[in-house]
Amino acid sequence: MDFGSMVLGYPDRVGLNEIFAKAMELQARRIARLPEEERAGAVAAFLAGDDDEGAPGPPGGRVEESEEPPDTSSLDELLEIHERLLPRLPPDSREHRLLHGGRNMLRLVQIMYESMYAPGDTRTRLQLMRRALPLMRELFEELPAQLEELGIKPELFGAHTALAFAYESPFEQLEAVEEGVRAARRRLTELAPDTPEYAETRTTLALSLFVRHALWSEEADYEEAVGIARELTSAPAPGWRTAMLLTQWTSAAQSRIQRTGLLGQAPPGVGQSPSLITRLASDGAATALDDRDPVEALETLEDGRAHLLSGALNARRELEVLHGADAKLHGRLRAALERIRALRTAREPGRWPTPDEEDELRSASDDAAWLVAELQQHPGFQRFLTPLPLGLDDLLPAAAEGPVVSVNINPRRCDALALCPDGLRAVPLPRLYASDLVAQAESFRVAVEALTAGPRDPLFEDAREIFTGTLAWLWDVLAEPVLDALGFTGPPESGAPWPRLWWSPSGVLNSFPLHAAGRHGSGEAADAAVLDRVASSYTPTLRALLFSRARRRAAPGRRRTLAVAMPQTAGQAPLARTVTEATEAVAAGGGVPLIGPAATRDSVRAAMVDAAVVHFACHADSDPEDLSAGRLLLADGDLLIRDIAELHLETAELAYLSACGTARGGATAALADEVIHLGSAFQLAGYAQSVATLWEVGDSFAARAAAEFHRTLAPSLPGPGPLPAALALHHTVRSLRQDDRERPWTWSALVHAGA
């Protein structure tokens, strides 16, 4: 039983002695995690009463005495709507049962907020919280019936929960959400306002907007959805769809209040904010570091980052483990999941499903859930598909080949958490401020646009100063303190191997080239840049690095290389050097290039099945506002990001994406932490490593960089060990820098990710 449950159980089920013992256990565990030299001071502070660990507080942090309670007026409005509608519904109707449960949940949330922000001591707050116990008991007793109303058999609730994590591609989810909103808007323009179909489509639109708000916290989505919901819930007697809409509105309002409490009482701004999960993780990590508990900080941060990508990687891993343990059961489950996917895909977006469609999807979901329930009876599969929190012992193998530096950006404090082979080190970053990063990122983005446009751009010279100044700033406030703390104080000794280091930034920091941080001018010190001390790679999370490393194979004999080149693409600038790129890539690894008209979507996908190394020299397209829109431009159309992520490639090792912006993620705060782009799509497809670009690169430069990289990597291709792509790229970038220190925006665009 956790501490919170014990407190709520006092005095009926739990005595003071048990609560006291649990509190002591938590304190002892926290103090044991501190460095040895700090433990005595922590014990003394605790005995003196200066330690407030364990005090109850709102989700995501503690309540300070001066903290203002959040604005819960939206809950008051929703409670009033529930109270108004319930008497108009037959007590035995499913609509009444659903709204009755919603009303109880609203009352419960109101009590919790009133209790947490009530004046007085902890004892007073706990007494107020106990008012919620009867409501909690009633909600628990009504849960089976509520699940039945939603088409979920209570005995399959756990299995259906697991199925919610069965998505193997985040791009499919994102596209479904965006297309649901777009299709509902299109449909509304085609319908008469006074028809039932029009009201039905408005309900669908509002539900889709609430779902998108849950992902990205887009304030405009919430306001539009609430406007529709207010109008639709004013009907004399709501139907099932309106009741469902009211339930979704309630959920969105609760999340919004919680996020407002985290971000402050200022009215939500226009546009997207950091996702609630991400912000909770960041705040939790900062709080743990305040308490000198870096282990808790890292575990908390890891659970809250890149949750769409991490969920997809977890589903891939779980299904692979199942295939190895029971291929027959894996085949049955795979077929059931494909049936669900086909039914969802066949639905017309923006339209409420028909009863037959709902029944068919419910039947398919139940079939899959029964399989999962059966599987969960097997040893080792009790939590199948459900992403489990990873502890330090689980994460430590990620640092087997070099430190992994996770960077937490929080308004209260910024820190690096360096997971090393011998343990975890926290590196405070007192000169890095979260408030500076958004403006710095926007200034840097504008500078990159001007520099890649060329010297004719009127902002070119100013952009050059901004770019080099940003690299120096990153060195001063982040990279140098981290490297110094880890003992990387200069280049390796002559003949010694380059040490490896993985960067795992969070939030808007993902848009900066940390691997290129430093001062690169000809007159600067020889060790004043990351490139002069370590060979850098990137990983969105420690979990993702573990996934990549598990898929890294030792291939016997020379690896087969697939090289794709598009020298001419309709509507795009010619890429004359791509043919040479493809030819040299194939010459290094063996294989057949697909050039120009031969590079069709089907031929490329077919050739990828047997290729260990793939090299794409073509145009790419991406939309920082829509992560599902990434694509590689081929002879007969686009190879979409979702098409790549859906592949399951057994021989894949390395993807070299010599195209523009293939490692460019989302531009907004809500999207920045997801690290979803073409490079990560190739990781999902099975590639343990990728080389990609953060922004646009010229044709001639791309060809030269690719040739240097493949020449460096070629001697390793026949060997049985993992490909040293990170070291090959490190050598390449240092060589390119040596020849052109005055244009760092060229060579700093190249990044290595994965194992």
Image (tube, rainbow, N blue to C red):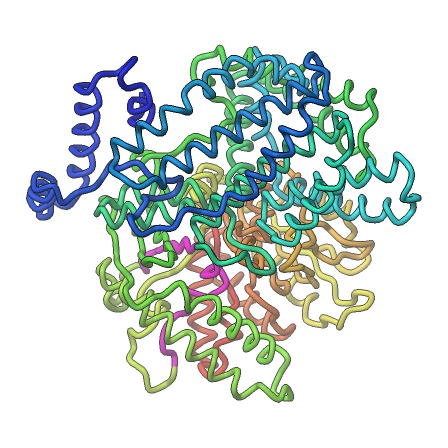
Point 28% across, 19% down: residue: 10
Point 62% across, 28% down: residue: 83
Q: Is residue 192 above or below residue 2?
A: below
Q: Is residue 70 on the magenta stretch?
A: no
Q: For this rendering, which residue is in front, 672 or 101?
A: 101
> Within the image, what quadrant is residue 393 found in?
top left
Left or right, 608 with reference to 257? right
Q: Is residue 256 above or below residue 93?
A: below
Q: For this rendering, which residue is in front, 751 or 200?
A: 200
Q: Is residue 361 above or below residue 646?
A: above
Q: Is residue 606 visible?
A: no
State the extent of the magenta-drawn residues as a range.
Answer: 498-520
Q: Quadrant of the N terminus?
A: top left
Left or right, 655 with reference to 266? right
Left or right, 432 with reference to 257? left
Point 54% across, 69% down: residue: 705
Q: Where does residue 182 sit, x and y in percent of width and height?
A: 78, 48
Q: Is residue 345 visible?
A: yes
Left or right, 145 with reference to 434? right
